[in-house]
Image (spheres, rainbow, N blue to C red):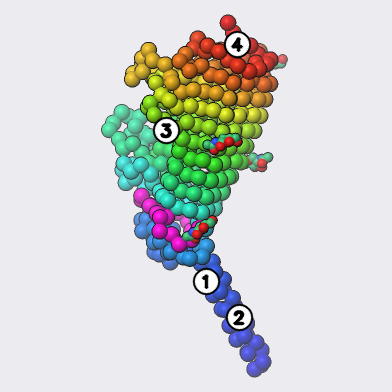
Amino acid sequence: MAISRMFQILIVTLLHYFSASILAANPIYNVFSYGAKADGKFDCTKAFEDAWGAACASVSPATIYVPQGRYILGNAYFDGSTCKNNATTIQIDGTLSAPYDYNVIGDSVHWLKFRRVNGVSIRGGTLDGQGANLWACKASGKNCPKGATSLAFLNSDKISIDGLTSINSQKFHIVADGCRDAKLRNIKISAPDESPNTDGIHIGRSSGVSVTNSRIATGDDCVSVSPGTSNLFVENVTCGPGHGISIGSLGWVMDEAGVENVTVKSCVFSGTQNGVRIKTWARPSNGYVRNVHYEDLTMINAENPIIIDQNYCPNNQNCPNQMSGVKISGVTYKDIHGTSATETGLNLECSKAEPCTGITLDKIMLNYKNKTAAVVCGNAVQKMDGVINPLKCLP
Ligand SMILES: *[C@@H]1O[C@H](CO)[C@@H](O)[C@H](O)[C@H]1NC(C)=O
Ligand SMILES: *[C@@H]1O[C@H](CO)[C@@H](O)[C@H](O)[C@H]1NC(C)=O
Ligand SMILES: *[C@@H]1O[C@H](CO)[C@@H](O)[C@H](O)[C@H]1NC(C)=O
Ligand SMILES: *[C@@H]1O[C@H](CO)[C@@H](O)[C@H](O)[C@H]1NC(C)=O
């Protein structure tokens, strides 16, 4: 009896010792400890920010844990500028929801904002932007807030997002702006076909971003790319409904950073407005797009499977009779197959001022109603280098 009692005490002591040492090495901050309630009513903004503050102050790698349940958050700001570690994991088993009243976050640009963080990983979780009432407000033509991006990483390095689901953002779902080295994997994004500006993943002024093994269905671009982006890699993304994967709109201003080294590989576009698009304003600009590689893309009734549009000037406002100054060079389309929902499978309207150069078409097999889809090279194209096989531009 006495021996087994002593044994028990020994075990308990050992367990205490080990768990304490594990905690010290790798602390876990449960949002419940900071006052969060997973009841779908309580405002958990402060609890999440406080848990972040604690993790950020940890000198060793830290984990923030969000148990199952529904958490309401208003605008939350996670500032990393004074963090003491390089490796904070946010493990989410629950759903983070924006407030039902869209006005709470609607006038801020971002709902959940990470800024100047280094080495943050988000694992799992669902974000619910509760955008429906705001879209309805916008559709009614009333004066409505612009809407917030659900999740934004600004001026941050070494980001990893794995297994996150994002639904019904007011505006964009996920934004990386001014970031280096971001890996987005196994992301699921959805918003209705007709929801306005609900881009899936928007990347600007960033380098070394990859988006892989993801499923994106929204009312706007699945992935959109804005100036100053380089070394972007997109693979195994299923897109649709939505507007496709788009570089642009670029060239609104004269002085603009270029886009270079973009690869889009093994993606499927289903019922999308575009497949892969490069779009620039018909305005003077010294921007550029170079070294873009599209390969192994499947189109299933995409309206514009392959499109370069350098004459973008909606309603002929701010750019009539002007030409785009954005120079597009070195774009390869290889093994693009499937079906087009319109007669034109490939539409390359380059700028008269800065004709596209180094466009390579290799194994383009697109059908429209069982016939090879047409290729249109807009009047603006002065010169196109490269192989055009098996299709030729119509005269
Ligand atoms: C972050 O990591 C880099 C190397 O990867 C290191 O030089 C730096 O000191 C780290 N910063 C902190 C706050 O741990
Ligand atoms: C592509 O992504 C899906 C998830 O969207 C995943 O199930 C599948 O295994 C991935 N395929 C490859 C070849 O990695
Ligand atoms: C683009 O890729 C080329 C070739 O790999 C590389 O030399 C260049 O530095 C890259 N550009 C940027 C901005 O990283
Ligand atoms: C395409 O061809 C198949 C088989 O040849 C035929 O059954 C189908 O009706 C055709 N579809 C169209 C839209 O012409």
Q: Residue at x 38, y 34 (%)?
A: 135
Observer-side mark, 3 or 1, equals 1
Residue 202 lies in the magenta-colored region? no
- Residue 394 is left or right of residue 171, and the answer is right
What span is colored magenta in the figure? 64-86
Looking at marks 3 and 2 on the same chain, the residue that comes earlier in the sequence is marked by 2
Q: Which residue is mark 4?
A: 393
Observer-side mark, 3 or 4, equals 4
In space, the residues marked 2 and 4 are separated at their CA atoms by: 76 Å
The type of residue carrying mark 4 is Cys
In space, the residues marked 3 and 4 are separated at their CA atoms by: 33 Å
Residue positioned most to the bottom: 2
Q: Which residue is mark 1?
A: 24
In space, the residues marked 3 and 1 are separated at their CA atoms by: 44 Å
Instruction: Say if disc 3 is inside 8 Å of ligand 2.
Output: no
- Picture coordinates of residue 146, whole percent (x, y): 33, 36
Q: Quadrant of residue 377?
A: top right
Looking at marks 1 and 2 on the same chain, the residue that comes earlier in the sequence is marked by 2
Q: Which residue is mark 2?
A: 14
Mark on residue 197?
Answer: 3
**In the foreground, 360 or 89:** 360
Residue 72 lies in the magenta-colored region? yes
